[in-house]
Amino acid sequence: MTALRSLLFAPANHARRVEKALTLAADAVILDLEDAVAISEKAEARPLIIEALEKPRVGRLFVRVNALSTEWCYGDIVVAVRPGLDGIVLPKVEHAHELRTADWLIGNLEQARDLPRGTIDLIPIIETAVGVSNLPAICSAGTRVRRLAFGAGDFTLDMGMAWSRDETELLPYRAACVLASRAGGLEPPVDTVWADLRDNEGFVASARKAAALGFQGKLCIHPDQIVPANAAFTPDEAAVARARRIVAAFEKAEADGLASIQLDGQFIDYPIVQRARRVLEQGGG
């Protein structure tokens, strides 16, 4: 698995911002046809998607289309599915059948345009109470979905909930996304945006909390959020060094017939070693 630590939104109808976003160190750029584009400009923004897909870029490139319940979703997907696209981001998903519909449409477009079948990713954003309540079915829908994302802005609006700086109120819903993803055989999910662009410390705290909960990355709405997002979801040098020591010590002990040891006063057995190996995979160690 190649983690998506940072996914930067860029308004699809703003060519200069899109061109800049494609040069940045985000693991993925999401060209946004939904919230970032006014209703009067949604159709006019689509040709700019085609231009962006032909440009060089650093990371992967996704397009957030409008929700399946809107009049624009079909046209958005038809325009976006072409060479150069890595995936579709589908907002406000509430039911498994929505993913099956989007999967069917993307698959038919892949076939019609001689694209390899199943290679275009599909990321649903869970951002309503109905969506959260249907997470198990959504995560086991049997579609091309590899991971989902959580959207706290619309979710807290739907719930009539205050979105606080420490985000304590989001804990059960974030945890539900991680649990359902794991149970459904998906990759770890992607966490919500951080809306206060003046509060970088708050963003860092939010990203670290999401990483500790089991998310793989975070949606970003400003270039300044890319570096701290990448850092939050990448083990630091101390963690990688500690993981190397654990694995090395345990492998030596295992060769001597031991299944558990102590290292610096910590009990080490197979689950701890597996966690250390995961840290090494994430940290490139």
Image (spheres, rainbow, N blue to C red):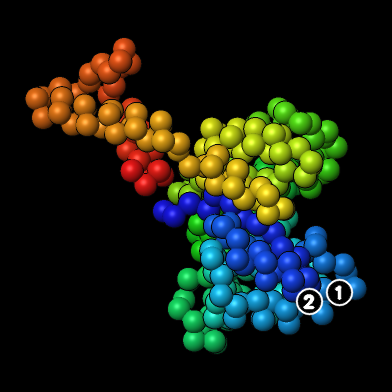
Q: Residues within 10 Å of mark 1 (few under 14, many from 20)?
A: few
Residue annotated with mark 2: 45
Location of residue 18 in the rendering, given as x and y in whole percent from the top left corner = 70, 69
Q: CA distance from mark 1 to mark 2?
A: 6 Å
* Tag 1–tag 2 contact (CB < 8 Å): yes
Q: Residues within 10 Å of mark 2 (few under 14, many from 20)?
A: many
Residue annotated with mark 1: 41
Mark 2: amino acid: Ala
Question: Which residue is located at x 54 percent, y 65 percent?
Answer: 58
The furthest residue to the top: 265
Q: In the picture shown, does residue 198 fall above or below 224?
A: above
Q: Dot 2: what SS?
A: helix
Quarter of the image with the C terminus is top left
Location of residue 7 in the rendering, given as x and y in whole percent from the top left corner = 61, 55
Q: Please indicate whether residue 17 sits to the left or right of residue 5 in the image.
A: right
Q: Please indicate whether residue 84 sits to the left or right of residue 169 in the image.
A: left
Q: In the picture shown, does residue 137 fall above or below 105?
A: above
Query: For residue 183, which numbered disc appears in the image?
Result: none
